[in-house]
Image (tube, rainbow, N blue to C red):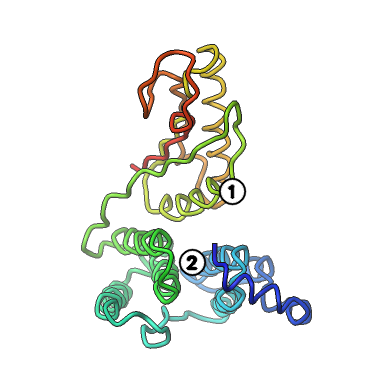
């Protein structure tokens, strides 16, 4: 996704090998933390962000989030200052106001009362800052912003988080394997889903083939999405899996028609 950063990272492989500890996501995640519930939740959140950035080849931000995860084992740390990133001028006021709301929620006891939500809000804010600085992936910016706002809202702060749009992923013909594009979208869904009460995962097929077979295929697709979401931090109890088979089409066709836009799984946030 991040071509330029990936190219730079590839050219620096010998250096990375010598400094692998800087990107030890598993080590940051598993480091002993005897601090507060908020510190432990924040350690997990930053380690998750580090893993996402590492997987995209963004070594600088992977290292930043690894170090922030480790810092939580020694004490509480604040969300990043807006001035510490090169934020576009037209976004500075919005992000400064958002950080002020977050700090006010912390001052009102949000970390102690709702440590999970507080950690999600802080990690979401730092994620938003990181993506806004890069400023070329609007979907990622929006996903981090919504993650922040959902955590802020769960602490009892206002405004209420906006409704999260459905995410739709598509499949190859007669396949339940996730494509790379689908995985990218589902990473965003996993971030957004932590701010939702439930995720409704519904599988679909086109009308080609036997209806009973298609219903089973649709369920396999929904289960593949569910397993990916669980592997990326969504609790199994929050996911509702269903299969509509060929009965609910995005594009109306006759029977026996291959249609790529109908071979899909929808993820709805409740």
Q: Residue at x 50, y 48 (%)?
A: 186
Q: Residue at x 50, y 38 (%)?
A: 170
Q: Distance from label 2 to label 1 (Cα)? A: 35 Å
Q: Residue at x 64, y 77 (%)?
A: 8
Residue labelled with disc 2: 37
For mark 2, does the 10 Å Cα neighbourhood hold few (<14), some (14 to 19), or many (20 or more) residues? some
Front one among 213 and 224: 213
For mark 1, does the 10 Å Cα neighbourhood hold few (<14), some (14 to 19), or many (20 or more) residues? few
Residue 250, given in percent of the width and then of the height, sits at 37, 29
Residue 218, given in percent of the width and then of the height, sits at 52, 25
Quarter placement of the C terminus: top left
Left or right: 37 as drawn, with respect to 104? right
Earlier in the chain: of badge 2 and badge 1, it is 2
Left or right: 140 as drawn, with respect to 52? left
Q: Mark on residue 180? A: 1
Quarter placement of the N terminus: bottom right
Find residue 142 and report its image quarter: bottom left
Q: Residue at x 47, y 79 (%)?
A: 76
Find residue 224 and report its image quarter: top right
Residue 50, given in percent of the width and then of the height, sits at 58, 69
């Amino acid at each position: 996704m991040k071509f330029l950063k990936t190219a730079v990272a590839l050219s620096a492989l010998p250096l990375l090998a010598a400094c692998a500890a800087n990107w030890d996501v598993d080590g940051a995640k598993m480091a002993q933390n005897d601090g507060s519930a908020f510190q432990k939740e924040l350690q997990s959140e930053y380690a998750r962000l580090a893993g996402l950035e590492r997987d995209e080849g963004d070594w600088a931000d992977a290292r930043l989030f690894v170090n922030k995860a480790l810092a939580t084992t020694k004490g509480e740390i604040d969300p990043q200052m807006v001035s510490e990133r090169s934020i576009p001028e037209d976004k500075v006021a919005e992000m400064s106001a958002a950080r002020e709301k977050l700090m006010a929620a912390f001052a009102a006891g949000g970390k102690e009362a709702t440590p999970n939500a507080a950690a999600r809000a802080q990690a979401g804010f730092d994620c938003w800052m990181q993506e806004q600085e890069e400023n070329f992936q609007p979907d990622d910016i929006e996903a981090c912003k919504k993650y922040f706002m959902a955590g802020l809202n769960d602490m009892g702060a206002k405004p209420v988080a906006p409704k999260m749009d459905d995410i739709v992923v598509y499949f190859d013909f007669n396949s339940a394997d996730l494509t790379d594009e689908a995985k990218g979208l589902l990473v965003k869904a996993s971030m957004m889903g932590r701010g939702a009460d439930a995720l409704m995962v519904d599988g679909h097929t086109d009308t080609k083939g036997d209806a009973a077979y298609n219903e089973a295929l649709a369920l396999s697709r929904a289960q593949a999405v569910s397993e990916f979401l669980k592997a990326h931090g969504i609790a199994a109890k929050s996911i509702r899996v269903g299969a509509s088979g060929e009965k609910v089409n995005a594009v109306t066709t006759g029977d026996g028609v291959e249609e790529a836009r109908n071979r899909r799984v929808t993820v709805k946030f409740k």
